[in-house]
Image: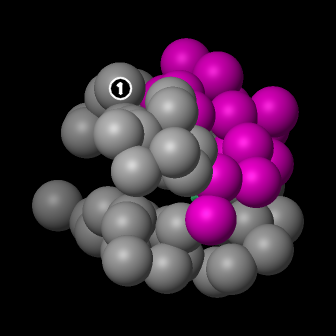
């Protein structure tokens, strides 16, 4: 999950895991992340964890099943 209130659209997550995240321009003029895969496959775990690590605002949380 992503705490959208704190996402500032830096797009670091997109750079790390483009299969899982996209960053779009919102109506308010600010870019924000949108999650493409809520349950990404295990093969993408390393990329997702990099996005978690490098998100400048630390707003991405991985919830395990
Ligand atoms: S890196 Fe973090 S702050 Fe930047 S768009 Fe992704 S979730 Fe939002």
Local SS, label 1:
loop
- The residue closer to the viewer here, 57 or 53, is 57
Q: Is residue 42 left or right of residue 14?
A: left
Q: Residue at x 73, y 66 (%)?
A: 55
4 sits left or right of 59 in the view: left
Q: Position of residue 65 (x, y in %)?
A: 17, 61
Q: Is residue 18 left or right of residue 22?
A: right
Q: How far across and how far down the image is residue 45, in percent?
A: 57, 43
Looking at the picture, tell me which residue is in the foreground, 29 or 56: 29
Q: Is residue 44 visible?
A: no
Q: Is residue 10 visible?
A: yes
Q: Which of the four quarters of the rendered structure image does ligand 1 lie in?
A: bottom right
Q: Image height check: is 39 above or below 53?
A: above
The quarter in which the N terminus is drawn is bottom left
Is 57 part of what is drawn in magenta? no
Q: Residues within 10 Å of mark 1 (few under 14, many from 20)?
A: few
Q: Residue at x 73, y 44 (%)?
A: 11
User: Residue furthest toward the left?
Assistant: 65
In depth, the one of 6 and 27 nearer the eye is: 27
Quadrant hosting residue 19: top right
Q: Is residue 3 left or right of residue 9?
A: left
Magenta range is 8-23
Which residue is at the front of the view, 6 or 17? 6
| In this view, 46 is above or below 55 | above
Colour scheme in use: one colour
What residue is shown at x 35% (from left), y 40% (from top)? 27
What residue would you read off at disc 1? 36
- Which of the 4 quarters of the picture holds residue 23? top right
Residue 18, how many percent across, how many down?
Answer: 64, 22
Q: Quadrant of residue 10?
A: bottom right
Q: Position of residue 26 (x, y in %)?
A: 41, 40
């Amino acid at each position: 999950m992503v705490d959208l209130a704190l996402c500032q659209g830096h797009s670091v997550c997109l750079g790390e895991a483009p299969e899982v995240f996209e960053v779009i321009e919102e109506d308010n003029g600010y870019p924000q992340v949108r999650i493409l895969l809520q349950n990404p496959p295990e093969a993408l775990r390393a990329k997702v964890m990099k996005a978690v690590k490098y998100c400048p605002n630390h707003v991405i949380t991985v919830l395990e099943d």
